[in-house]
Amino acid sequence: MSETNELLSVRNAKKSFRLGGLLSTKEIIAVNEVSFTLFKDKPDILSIIGESGSGKSTLSRLILRLLLPDSGNIELEGKDVHAMKGRKQELDYMRRVQPIFQNPFETFNPLNRVDEFLLATAKNYYPGEKPELTKERVEMALQAVGLSLSEVGGRYPHELSGGQLQRSSVARAIIPNPKILVADEPVSMVDASLRMSIVNLFQDLKNKLGTSIIYITHDLATAYYISDRIAIIHKGYFVEQGETAPILTNPKHPYTKLLVESTLDPRPGATSLADGDISTGDEEYLAVGCKFAARCPRAMDICRKVQPEETIDGTWKVRCHLYGGNI
């Protein structure tokens, strides 16, 4: 049996939630028929972009094994990640797939010093290692993010700046030398002046360590800057995905066009994804047919009745009735 070149493969993943409790008959499908692949021989940054409530964080929780999919599967190097059992297999998965959280203050216990937490993390993944090697491992992780043990040593989370703490959070994630980082809105709570330093750090991790990154965001500007590929998610579906520059400079799906226009519109008072949510909430999730039809300026009768299939042209994929097999 030949070894697969697929690092992470998500195939037709689906996850639903009931609205209004267990007795409710209404449900939303937060992730619906989502598929994508990361490859071993080509580390890259895949940005998953959407408004609040689009399903992107649910997808990240599926990848991190915090949720179980209703159907479809997620594989790491050909092995079903949700079929892994026991502490050894779970720790091995965590070693290779690490999260970076939106709020760095949720990463660290406020009562523990940052260096103590990082050293404890290293000991957890490398039990029995000599203390000097553990310290060296943490030092290397900190240096990779532009810090050092001397800078964070003896300091509590509140004693570091927001940028230092988020960098320390990234250092924690790379201590086990993961193949994949899942970064869920990692710059949304960082001052605007520090955002580019964090996203530049992700590029360095990809280029120097060969780490692939799933960058989950509503910020098109940073996604455009660092991504090799993007996937636009709307109410559970990937509606457009492919290489970053072609999609964001010449979007095909009306929803992608709305995101680009709302982000780039310079008029006073214009809506921006960076400033909040422009979606209509659960109503779109419950709609029959294309979930975007009620807002789409190019909606046709079929859009309100039938969910479109994906149209594929090479690496460019669009889920829209406008294209009917031709992008």
Image (cartoon, rainbow, N blue to C red):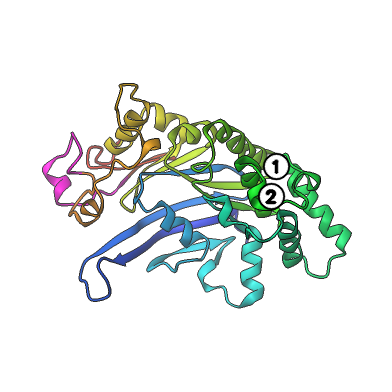
Residue 107 is tagged as none
Residue at left offset 43%, top offset 35%: 220
Q: Element under label 1?
A: loop
Q: Residues within 10 Å of mark 1 (few under 14, many from 20)?
A: many
Residue at left offset 66%, top offset 61%: 111
Quadrant of the image occupied by residue 202:
top right
Is-magenta flag for residue 154? no
Is-magenta flag for residue 299? yes
Residue topped by disc 1: 145
- Nearer-N-terminus badge (1/2): 1
Q: Are marks 1 and 2 in contact (CB under 8 Å)?
A: yes
| Residue found at the very far bottom of the displayed protein | 86
Q: Residues within 10 Å of mark 2 (few under 14, many from 20)?
A: many
**Quadrant showing the C terminus:** top left
The answer to whether residue 110 of the structure is visible from this angle is yes
163 in relation to 106, above or below: above
Inspect the image, locate mark 2, and give the three-letter code of the amino acid beneath it.
Answer: Ala
Please provide the residue range marked out in magenta.
293-310
What secondary structure prevails in the magenta region?
loop
For marks 1 and 2, give the CA distance: 6 Å
Task: Pinpoint residue 245: horizontal percent, then vertical percent.
Answer: 46, 29
**Quadrant showing the N terminus:** bottom right
Quadrant of the image occupied by residue 118:
bottom right
304 in relation to 130, above or below: above
Residue topped by disc 2: 171
Q: Element under label 2?
A: helix
Inspect the image, locate mark 1, and give the three-letter code of the amino acid beneath it.
Answer: Val
Question: 101 left or right of 307?
Answer: right
The total of numbered circles placed on residues is 2
